[in-house]
Amino acid sequence: MSKNFKVEENDYGKRVDLFVLEKDLTLTRTSTKKLIMEGLVKVNNEAIRPNYRVRENDEVQIESDKISEFLDDTDSTSLVPTQMNLDIIHEDKDLIVINKPAGLVVHPVYTHKDDTLLNGLTYYFIKKNLEVKVRPVHRLDKETSGVILFSKNKESNEIYSKIFEEHTAEKIYYAVVEGDFRTFMIKKNRPDFFEYFTYISKEKNGDRIHFNTSKEKGLPSRTKIYFENYWRGGHAVKVYSLLKLQPLTGRTHQLRVHLSSLGFPILGDLLYSNHRYKRMMLHAYSLKLPLKTGDREFIAELPDVFE
């Protein structure tokens, strides 16, 4: 089965490997490069190089079925087993769910090749004498802690990846932000929750910044925001709020962009504010997955720093 993606204006000039990574969250940059070299990713039905930059009217084809077979037959990421303490929330024959600490990268990139969560999982399964090709079903930013799900085989990867692709997974996050969000909600006449909708795009110069933009240039992004309580955390001078967040779409940096643009940046988020703290105060608390056999929910309790 081939997935076809039309290149939008906000992607013009982007390297094709980075374009593919944003469309398929189960891949790493290393594996994406190999897949392109194998001809399993094409542009306008023609083979290209990983450094090809997508242009207006381009259509990118991703051979999903063949990619799954390729990843099953090859060591696409050349993972180095690395011993680390894993906080395992749940494990069965198909899945392993981890409570990821803040500051840990999920999968290898150029600056982190052997100290990522996937390296730790590789070591974990080797010690258990299990041959498992574990893959992340979704992603969390390095600075974000909380629930993250990995598949242990091809079949489960396809099932759970489709749930995220269709945006039917229910995710709850908690964040500490600077400012009085309760008063903001009262002024907006939103006593229960505030729902925020924008279109999000990314800077073209290659940095990590995302921002709100027009319908023509961005992707639709919607978040429900609930005020939970005031939070002091040792900062007696300023007012901070603890918020519960429900992203209804899954855009990169969506929660960070939405809160920052509303004037309530996340404490410790140095990319979208200058509010230094011991960590970025964003935590993926729960993940509920709708399945034919019934809903499955995984929870990572709030770290002590949020209390």
Image: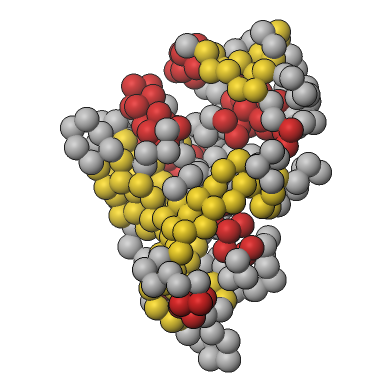
Residue displayed at 69% across by 38% down: 216
Q: Nearer the viewer, residue 92 or 195?
A: 195
Residue displayed at 35% across by 47% down: 170
Q: Is residue 284 visible?
A: no
Task: Determine which quarter of the picture holds residue 192.
Answer: bottom left
Please, which residue is most extreme toward the left here? 293
Query: x, y percentage for residue 228?
Result: 38, 73
Query: x, y percentage for residue 70?
Result: 51, 14
Compared to residue 225, the image places residue 218 above or below, namely above
Q: Nearer the viewer, residue 204 or 192?
A: 192
Residue displayed at 39% across by 24% down: 158
Q: State left or right for residue 31 relative to residue 81.
A: right
Please, which residue is most extreme toward the front here? 189
Residue displayed at 52% across by 22% down: 75
Query: x, y percentage for residue 82?
Result: 49, 43
Compared to residue 55, the image places residue 191 above or below, namely below
Q: Quadrant of the C terminus?
A: bottom left
Q: How many numbered marks, from 0 up?
A: 0
